[in-house]
Amino acid sequence: MVEPVLSSSRRSRPVDEASLRAGIRQAWGWAIMFGAGEISFALFAAEIKMPTLFFGILTGVPLLLGPLIQALAANCLDRYGHRKGLVLGGALTQMGCFVPLAILAFLIARTEPAERGALWVPILFMLIVCVYFAAGSFTHPPYSSMISELVPEHRRGGYFARVSRDASFLVLVAQALVGGALLWAERQEGREDLALLIFAGAFALAGVARLHSYVQIVSMKDPPYNPKPDAYFTFVQFIRRTRESNFVKFVVFVALTHFSAQVAGPYFLPYWKYELNYSTSQWVVMSGAATLASILMLPLWGRFSDRFGNKCTLFLTGLAISAIPLGWMFTANLWVLVAVNLYSGVVWSGFNLSSWNYILDAVTPHKRARCVAYFNIVCGIGMFGGSMVGGWLHPHLPQHEIEPGLASTFFYLLLASAVCRLLTCLLLLPLFRELRPVQPLPVKHWIFQIARMRVPVGIRFDAEPLDQEDEAPADPENDKPA
């Protein structure tokens, strides 16, 4: 989390190493919670055979609700100034949500299969999930503000790279544990309740992991927070600056990219389970492929963005993201789809990393919590809208033969998603600019002369240093969102 401007007091503040170590350990707990708990939400919904439209609601409603909660958190932060207290409240609520989820999964496992499709089950499940996401969203602005104050500027790159790498690895481990257990359950004939019992255990593990995260946050120091008068601005004021603000244009681009992805995104799992008839454990393998690719590629994307800029990374990954649905449109082969998801993990990791880095380049520290909240509101509206559009289109689209014997309306959802992604990248990305001087990407010679493969360290970028006379001066202050 890189601050463009540092005050003299910020530079002189001693580094609290104990808090930095606790920050890493709390990320471990969060990652296990995410891998064992949050990723299991959709799998659990598929296990209890929720209708396809519910997957859109399950994805869209929390995505819309969460950012609104973030705006509330930013207001609370400006009013009370106690960041750690707000974070702890949200973490404790998330931990508490896994208790009824584990109980619900256990109770459903003990009911007759014919009774598991009762309407109250998905409704109760979605209510708990909404509270979970709201609590998590409440912690995001204050924690982002707090941790960015604790980590010195010159150590941020290495520190957050380690946090991301450790968290991604533990997410993968948690996914593998849940997937392995589900694979074992699938092989036990006559025990249809085993998968649900495994979900109960996964939710319990997620709750314990969040408790560990809570304990680590307690031990972290909360630097004094003194909001400046100009740090407050309303969401309406933020949106009104779309024409002149570089940052708001960037926000609209990211939001529409996520809108385009969510047109098909929530419906991959029901398509996988209900139409392709693949198992839950196979879905976990495919999802793990994306996580593994993300772990391996994050350092590369970080170096690429540092040299060529975040906008360049957004452009390349935005184009690459447009091609992801194509891999699903013409085949149902398991290993081809696993390879497509590997590719998806590669490009989405670069897109998400460069998006976050762009925010940090564009926003001054005292406005960061509010700008992050408004960024997530716009993205949440986009993702909710995409989910609802996809859910409305799904039953009204004609079927298309993907393979002999397999016809599905999902083909046209994928096509719509791909076209929307491509148009968003080509039309909106040119509207905002890079905020810092970077080296132009030499496209003609990039593949052969810039990137060379080395077995011990992977890909290394070796372009010549940027000539100072060719640097394009950037003035980040002119691009502050308010």
Image (cartoon, rainbow, N blue to C red):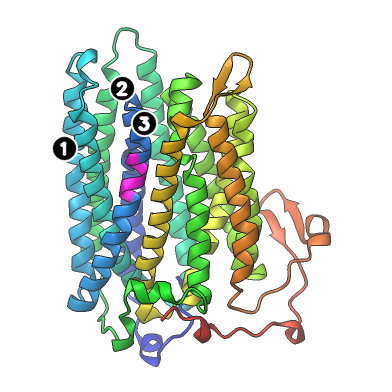
Distance from disc 3 to disc 2, alpha carbons, whole Å, reads 10 Å
The magenta segment is 57-62
* Numbered label attached to residue 100: 1
Question: Is tag 3's residue or tag 2's residue first in the polypeptide sequence?
Answer: 3
Q: Tell me whether the residue at label 1 lies in contact with that at label 2, contact meaning CB atoms closer than 8 angstroms.
A: no
> How crowded is the residue under tag 3: few (<14 C-alpha within 10 Å), some, or many (20+)?
some
Instruction: Name the element at disc 2.
Output: helix
* Numbered label attached to residue 342: none
Residue extending furthest toward the bottom: 8
Distance from disc 1 to disc 3, alpha carbons, whole Å, reads 17 Å
Identify the image quadrant of the C terminus.
bottom left
The residue beneath circle 3 is 43
Amino acid type, mark 1:
Pro
Q: Tell me whether the residue at label 1 lies in contact with that at label 3, contact meaning CB atoms closer than 8 angstroms.
A: no
Residue 327 x/y as whole percent? 63, 35
Q: What residue lies at 34% left-to-right and 8% top-to-bottom?
A: 189
Question: Is tag 1's residue or tag 3's residue first in the polypeptide sequence?
Answer: 3
Question: Is tag 1's residue or tag 2's residue first in the polypeptide sequence?
Answer: 1
Judge by depth and name the residue closer to the eye, 152 or 68: 68
- Which mark lies nearer to you, 3 or 2? 3
Q: Main SS type for the magenta part?
A: helix
In the displayed structure, would residue 191 be above or below residue 68?
above
Judge by depth and name the residue closer to the eye, 68 or 372: 68
The residue beneath circle 2 is 195
Distance from disc 1 to disc 2, alpha carbons, whole Å, reads 17 Å
Quadrant of the image occupied by residue 151: bottom left
Instruction: Name the element at disc 3.
Output: helix
Q: What residue lies at 17% left-to-right and 18% top-to-bottom?
A: 110
